[in-house]
Image (spheres, rainbow, N blue to C red):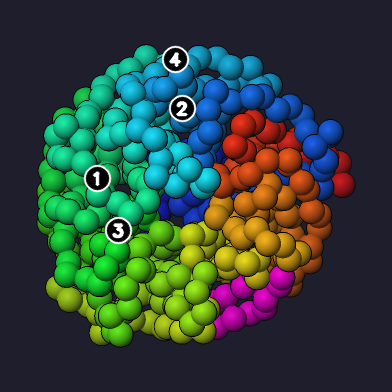
Amino acid sequence: MGVSLVAAVPGEWPSWRGPSAQGSVISGRFPQRWSLDSVAWKTELPGKGTSTPVVSGGRIYLTSPLAGQDAFLAFDLQGRKLWETPVGPLVDPRHRTLGSSCNASPVTDGQAIYAQFKSGHFAAVSLEGKVLWKVDLTERFGVEKLYWDSGTSPLIVGDSVILSRLHDGESWVAAFERKTGELRWKVARNFVVPAENNNGYATPLRIDHAGKPAVVIWGADHLTAHALDDGRVLWTAGGFNPAGTGYWPAIASPVLNGDTLLVPVGRDDRPGQANFYGIRMGGSGDVSQTHRVWERHDLGVFVAAPAVAEGRAYLLRHRGEVVCMDPSTGKTLWTGTLPKATAPYYASPVVANGVLYAAREDGVVFAAQVGGAFKLLSENPMGERIIASPVPAMDRLILRGDTHLFCIASQPQ
């Protein structure tokens, strides 16, 4: 079952979770230890953002506040700013410490860059920074009513850009024409759930259904799969919250391994409220009982999305425990622990050629050898808060902090 966002180009990172949407790459040379003084370069950013950069065509693209505006920025691999393009007035985040006006990460198909912002601006810009189209989601569909700040990133599938809006209001999934921004379809997605559980921050995921591309959405205690051509619901899975526990917004995004979707449920920042499920893709109607492959009620995550690499799944728990699982059975293969601190983990981990990178909120980035066992390789303080996920691309590690963009080059081992 293919999960590629767009045609994979070696060394590129076209979306928040990378070329396979699994938070991993299996080739390349990446740094295993570094210091703030040894970075290839760092450049100051115009505003605090938490969105993860993307890398394509030898350029780094990201979103950032810019003089009170939502903006796209482009840098080359030497850290030189190529252009900046504002697309409209920003809306301040509710969570001033962790959030920003641009939590959601951009995505690129190698022809344009697409992003949505808390303000409701949803836009595509060319590789040279020209605005190709812009949609005001707030003006068209109303204010997004989330307890915190908008976080779901766009998804490119074929000629469509998919967005989901799951909030305390009319929730929906929609497809926009990739080249024009015209609305292709929009379908309602509403479930009666406990308080805050209808708030969704997870990003849509491409799947295959009966040999055709489809989209799966996680949120409001349910999975729904939608046909790409018209958005109709292909199947639904529920039963993830039988006790009706409230304040379980969908934050961590699921990840696909083969035909099994690995679904984080609940929250790991509270004792006994984190679960993890394996759901088999396919079927029709309500597959809640028939397609549950395994379930775990003794572990899970809060914000950090799981990663899958070379047949293993990796969970970064809120306080730094790393769990390696067999994604086909849900069984734990090993556990490791990153050095403890008061700061937790909000950035999602990535695995690059056997090395897992995890960025703690206080700006310390860890590198650990993973695979058959866990071995901590290094602890690398960057000197500022990091919420964005690390980006392994072009034999470099790109890190986005509160105030700087960093590039760490691979070193001879």
Q: Is residue 4 shown left or right of residue 139?
A: right
Percent position of residue 27, x then y: 65, 48
Q: Residues within 10 Å of mark 1 (few under 14, many from 20)?
A: many
Determine the image quadrant of residue 409.
top right
* Element marked by disc 3: loop
Magenta-span inclusion, residue 330: yes
**3D distance between C-alphas at marks 2 and 4:** 19 Å
Residue 102 lies, in percent from the top left, at 42, 36
Amino acid type of the residue that numbered disc 4 sits on in the rendered structure = Glu
Nearest-to-viewer mark from 2 and 4:
2
Numbered mark located on residue 5 in the image: none
| Residue wearing tag 4 | 128
Does 152 appear in magenta? no
Provide the residue designation for mark 3.
199
Q: Is residue 105 visible?
A: no
Image coordinates for residue 394, horizontal then vertical, percent: 64, 35
* Label annotation for residue 65: 2
- Three-letter amino acid code at disc 2? Pro
